[in-house]
Image (cartoon, rainbow, N blue to C red):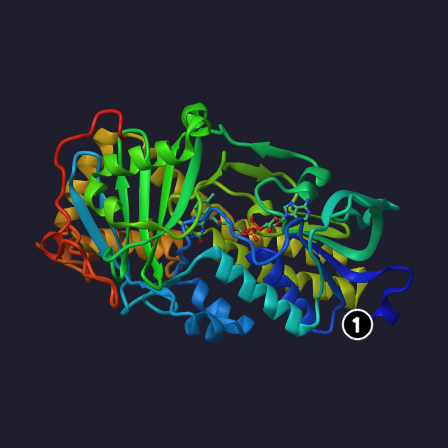
């Protein structure tokens, strides 16, 4: 599909947003010969507030996109599971089970600056036209369908970009989704603070979630002796955060029993603030336009599935858009199919995210649950295989899977101690190697989550 085939259009497809959803879609379309303009309000490489952990289910998609060798060469973190500490101090752990589920039993983790740049480079290599520092400010419409975009460049100059098809891959606060109408924000309860640090030791092959009375701290290795710290807190903390981002962040992180560890760290990035998160658009696809990634709906960062969903919705979208471009008469059916497939992909995970959310926002419930999960590591493993996009969400309600998980010790640490033992990061010295076992606090830290 060359420019000649686009008639009075500038391009075949205009993709708004060069995060994982937009860049991966551009790779797939450009590879199929479609003329793609990929635009982003920012210039790359750029960072993005994120936990930086890809679910194992994302790895086969990155392989398809041809970017896996480059990501592997960067020496990313590799997560084989998660450890969770309840507000009362009970640890439980689960590993992805290599004997079941799709794809590998480990996920990659690396800073978004690196992941997103690799995907964008992939799109450029396939021939997508990149328009950085270019913001979509409105949708062009013609005879009841989307016909392109109004865009503004870095110097504030506006012009039209006409396209046969428009894709909103522009994230949580998507302009394209707003233009399609019917975007419902959630209760807007939480915000997040994200920082990457260098540390002489830390969790090696698993991520950690430390749950508090009114917040959650995520900690994960992201390669090269760096760790991602993501603090999710109530939105009511926003004024305190804006008074002193640094002071607030350090105080809260220390409150999770990480005081000694924090003292050894050096910042590898500034502190990024984002939120609130929840958004649900009514219209995933209309004639001439569709939504992918966070723009197609986002619930919560706790289960860390957003990047997989961005890549997976883009994969579905590519198929439907190619069909629309090949034969415009089939557009209605192709878009209907995309709506159905995307909803089937997104809705069950959203339900699991809601359960997780309901549990972690009730400290007594999660304390009780943590004791059960600590005694049966096969149960958290089953949960992490679902949130790791290795098993469908329905696995959690299948009696046979649950019975097996209850009966077997599973791939976790049966009867063992799920508290983390952190090795030293190779190549860096630790001022206090004797404290490499990070001690657990069994009491709550008042006001410090
Ligand atoms: C605190 C937090 C932690 C998270 N942790 C994880 C995790 O560990 N693992 C995981 O899988 N997911 C995680 N997520 C979710 C993940 O970050 C998102 O789901 C993912 O980034 C979605 O990708 P995307 O391409 O849809 O959007 P984005 O990555 O947000 O990209 C959207 C792009 O669109 C651009 N843009 C926006 N508006 C316009 C416009 N009008 N014109 C032009 N460009 C525009 C932006 O500049 C941006 O580059 C986390 C989210 C949060 C908030």
Could you say which is closer to the camera, residue 80 or residue 333?
A: 80
Secondary structure category for the residue under label 1: loop
Residue 257 shown left or right of residue 246 in the figure? left
Q: Estimate the x, y position of residue 10 in percent, counting from the top left.
A: 85, 60
Quadrant location of the C terminus? top left
Residue 321 shown left or right of residue 292 in the figure? right
Q: Estimate the x, y position of residue 358 in percent, counting from the top left.
A: 34, 34
Q: Estimate the x, y position of residue 341 in percent, counting from the top left.
A: 57, 55
Q: Label 1, on which residue?
A: 1
Residue 73 shown left or right of residue 40 in the figure? left
Point 47% across, 76% down: residue:
69
Point 47% across, 46% down: residue:
49
Point 36% across, 69% down: residue:
104
Could you say which is closer to the camera, residue 95 or residue 137?
A: 137
Could you say which is closer to the camera, residue 74 or residue 433?
A: 433
Point 66% across, 69% down: residue:
124
Label 1 residue near ligand 1, CB within 8 Å: no
Q: Is residue 48 among the parts visible in the rendering?
A: yes
Q: Is residue 193 above or below residue 46?
A: above
Q: Is residue 242 above or below residue 323?
A: above
């Amino acid at each position: 599909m060359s420019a000649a085939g686009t008639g009075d259009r500038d391009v075949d497809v205009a993709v708004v947003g060069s995060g994982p959803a937009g860049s991966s879609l551009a790779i797939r379309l450009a590879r199929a010969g479609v003329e793609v303009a990929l635009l982003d309000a920012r210039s790359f490489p750029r960072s993005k507030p994120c936990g930086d952990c890809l679910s194992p289910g994302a790895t086969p998609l990155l392989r398809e996109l041809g970017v896996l060798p480059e990501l592997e060469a960067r020496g990313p973190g590799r997560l084989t599971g998660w450890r969770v500490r309840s507000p009362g101090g009970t640890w439980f752990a689960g590993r992805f089970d290599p004997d079941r589920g799709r794809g590998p039993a480990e996920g990659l983790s690396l800073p978004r600056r690196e992941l997103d740049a690799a995907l964008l480079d992939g799109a450029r290599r396939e021939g997508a036209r990149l328009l950085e520092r270019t913001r979509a400010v409105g949708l062009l419409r013609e005879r009841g369908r989307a016909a392109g975009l109004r865009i503004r460049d870095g110097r504030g100059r506006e012009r039209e970009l006409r396209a046969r098809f428009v894709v909103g891959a522009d994230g949580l606060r998507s302009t394209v989704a707003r233009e399609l109408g019917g975007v419902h924000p959630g209760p807007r309860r939480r915000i997040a603070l994200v920082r990457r640090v260098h540390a002489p030791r830390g969790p090696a092959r698993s991520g950690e979630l430390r749950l508090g009375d009114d917040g959650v701290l995520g900690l994960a290795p992201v390669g090269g002796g760096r760790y991602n710290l993501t603090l999710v807190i109530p939105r009511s903390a926003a004024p305190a955060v804006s008074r002193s981002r640094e002071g607030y962040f350090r105080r809260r992180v220390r409150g999770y029993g990480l005081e000694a560890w924090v003292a050894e760290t050096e910042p590898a990035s500034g502190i990024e603030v984002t939120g609130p998160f929840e958004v649900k658009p009514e219209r995933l696809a209309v004639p001439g336009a569709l939504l992918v990634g966070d723009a197609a709906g986002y619930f919560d960062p706790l289960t860390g599935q957003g990047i997989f969903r961005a890549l997976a919705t883009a994969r579905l979208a590519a198929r439907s858009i190619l069909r629309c471009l090949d034969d415009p008469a089939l557009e209605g059916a192709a878009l209907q199919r995309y709506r159905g497939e995307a909803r089937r992909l997104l809705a069950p995970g959203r339900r699991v995210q809601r359960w997780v959310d309901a549990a972690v926002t009730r400290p007594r419930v999660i304390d009780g649950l943590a004791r059960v999960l600590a005694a049966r590591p096969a149960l958290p493993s089953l949960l992490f295989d679902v949130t790791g996009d290795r098993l469908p969400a329905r696995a959690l309600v299948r009696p046979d899977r649950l019975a097996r998980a209850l009966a077997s010790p599973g791939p976790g640490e049966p009867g063992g101690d799920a508290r983390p033992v952190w090795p030293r990061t190779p190549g860096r010295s630790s001022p206090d190697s004797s404290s490499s076992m990070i001690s657990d606090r069994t009491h709550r830290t008042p006001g410090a989550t």
